[in-house]
Image (cartoon, coloured by chain):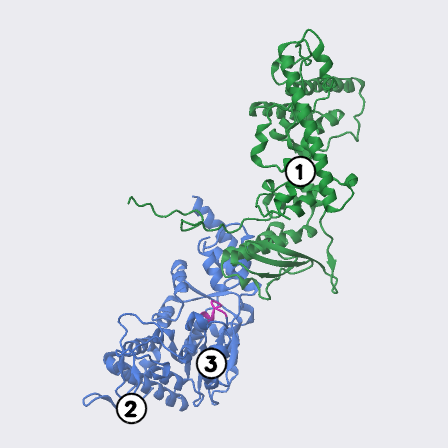
Amino acid sequence: MFTRNWKHLCRRYSQAVTFRTSEIYPAQHNENQIGLFYTIKPDLCKQLFNHGGLPKSFMKQTKTFTETAIMVRQPALDIMDCIRASDMNKPVIRYVLYGEKGSGKSLTLAHLLHYALEEGYLILHVPWVSEWLRRTPRHKEMTNSQTKEGFVDLPLDAAEWLLHFKTQNQALLKNCELKISKDYEWSKREKTEAGSPIAALVEHGINRVKYACDVIDALLLEIKILSNSKQCKTFVAIDGFNSFYYPMTRLNTPTKKKIKPEEVTLTNSFLELTKNDWNNGVVVLTIDQLAVPDENQESFLPRYLLYKKGFEHLDPFVPIEVGRYTDKEFLSCANYYRDRLWLRGPSDLETELKFTSASNPYNFMLQCAPL
Amino acid sequence: MSLIGIRQIIPAATKYFRYPLTIGTFQYCTRTTSDPSNVLNDLTDWETLNKKKKISKAMKAYLERAKEHDEFMKRQQFEYNIGKRHLANMMGEDPELFTQKDVERAIEYLFPSGIYDPAARPSMRPPEDVFPARKAAEFDEAGRPHHCLFYTGKPNFFKLLHDAADHLQQLYKYEDQVIRKKATPDPNGNLQLGGSMWVNKDQLEQLLVEKISDLEYDNFKVVMERLVSLPYSYRYKDFIEKFRKPLAVQKFALEIPKPNYDEEGRAYITTYECLRKKARGDVTIRSPGTGKITINKKDITYFDDVQSREQVLFPLIFTGMQNRVDVECNVEGGGPSGQSGAIRWGIAWGLRSFVDKDMLQQMQVAGLLTRDHRRRERKKPGQPGARKKPTWKKR
């Protein structure tokens, strides 16, 4: 009885204030919806983020709240406006999201991914670069590349990414408009002929894990060509991009040799993709302090995290800062938590939480958890 | 100059270097009581009294003790005066104008002591300060007690209760009179007891020169509360205020500094020497503000953990000033908890100038204005930590 009353109270409270928008298409979002939450449909969410893409703690929260609600925030709207306003025939524009730890870069990227999906872009999304270069689980597999001398393959990771690519772009891959331009010979018996759909290439990579890295290399090249010839428009999203430029990875070859990121084939493929030598596409990158070890997290600014090399590689790019919550966003978020019965107690709790979390979204989420 | 040298020069002074153990030896000192009704004037002419024939044994014993004590005190007083003159000469000052304060200064200068507890440091004080007061004779030479309540064992205490009860009766009577005459009560006659409280048990014992039990102290409080609750209790104001002592709040309420004004016309106040553990810093509070906190030129994220942030925030939230003042702090030394504690105290101390009296009292009660003097305890030899003992091993 008591809990029902509580629920009732909270629901009534939540009806009194607006923190939610019914507009579920990101393309329709505008300045009026800043600070409001919108819900991504579960099947879409599964398609986009089944193989990663949302931060782990946020995933836990979505499970508790039984919905994936993302706040409409200024940086995402800015990028959408820029994309709409830009000329697709010009070389791709690189957008770089940066900001403090836990300020919502990945979720802004998720919002943009949803936008790209609704707009019919071909999505090339890397959920977290450090997963490849810095995380070393026991089953991490590494082989020397057979096509490129002195390079290292990560076949399992590559295959996983291909699967991710396949699920994200189910609809586009189904219609066989997208064809590859030249023959690829993998071995004596296996080869992919020119004119076969991209889906066949992807399938091959998934089935023959040994060639996954080479498949990715080929796939990215093909997509570039297809984009240039206006057969598809492409949306590249890479989370934790600065990991590609950190001087060392944590990977070791079986002979205990340390590997640099540029010696990994996957790195080269994706760095090739972030060059602005192609058009009809959008590149959104996030750079994050969490992607590098603790001792190199002094600043969150691009020049520090990308090093000189990475900065020159990306230059010119559009830097977009993802900041802490503004007062309005904070209040809306607190109301959302109250609606989900995640935050209870007197209403002056918010002022205190605002100070102790310093309006940092992640910290706010953490501190609300036991309340 | 060595310590021995000084002792040779002022042999008398060394007598008064009070060490805790020596106090207990003077148990038979008999002198003064706070109650003026007792007979004291015959204390000095004990010789003539001794000559009288009829004297009880109790009186005889008392007179002997009194004589002994008087002599002792006289000697002590004499030695104290000599010692004071010596000290004055050594310090090159006029011995006639040398006060107790000068004595303390001289002792601190001549015998510098690093002993932690101030009570254990060398001191020289007048003998009446050092030796506790004793009750005077409560009976005459024939052995008859002066006081009517002598046989209760605690005459002063029960006299107090009697007086209080008597005042109660008087007040009832007075109230009846007022009602009968239909007179209007005196408008400016009321008792202000807000800033004071009843003396505690130890202080009451000192006032009465008698030991009392907890139950008796409770009885005292009940009677006094009842007396105070009556409408015309102001008639016995003197009697009541003898047993009340002012609260500590009033003391520092007087010394709150007035804020300064900067070029923008904002009131600001800077608290220097905010200390906690090893951290020290200063805190500036500017009054019309928006709740901006700057710590060493960073915002609240200077502290990583929630606890430290809460500490900084607590005085602001407690006083409800979180959106009305700006805070700037500089801290150094120590760790996060020490630094945040220092800032907390600095903010609370600075906020005194911007809050009203009620809030000040609440802050005092909440412990915001209290310095935390605790420091890290030193490690002891032979054990792994300050208190931790090595793991017990049978052999």
Observer-nearest residue: B19 or B78? Answer: B78
Residue A307, disc:
3
Chain identifier for the green-coloured part of the image: B
Magenta region, residue range: A100-107
Q: Main secondary structure of the magenta part?
A: loop
Which is nearer the eye, B197 or A161? B197
In the image, residue A357 sits, relative to residue A220, either above or below, namely above
Callout 1 secondary element:
helix
Instruction: Classify residue B135 as left or right of residue B265.
Output: left
Q: Chain of mark 2?
A: A
| Residue with the mark numbered 2 | A195
Q: Are marks 2 and 3 on the same chain?
A: yes
Query: Is residue A101 in the magenta section?
Result: yes
Q: Colour of chain A?
A: blue
Nearer to us in this view, B349 or A147: B349
**Please, what is the three-letter code of the amino acid marked with disc 2?**
Gly
Residue at x-position 79% and y-position 39%: B96
Give the Cα separation between the discs numbered 2 and 3. 41 Å
**Secondary structure type for disc 2:** loop
Observer-nearest residue: B60 or B292? B60
The residue to which callout 1 is attached is B13
Q: Earlier in the sequence, mark 2 or mark 3?
A: 2
- From where the camera sits, is residue A21 visible? no
Chain letter for mark 1, please: B
Rate crowding at label 2 as few (under 14), some (14 to 19) or many (20 or more) other CA atoms within 10 Å: some
In the image, residue A98 lies at what x, y percent? 49, 74
Label 3 crowding class (10 Å Cα cut-off): few <14, some 14-19, many 20+?
Answer: some
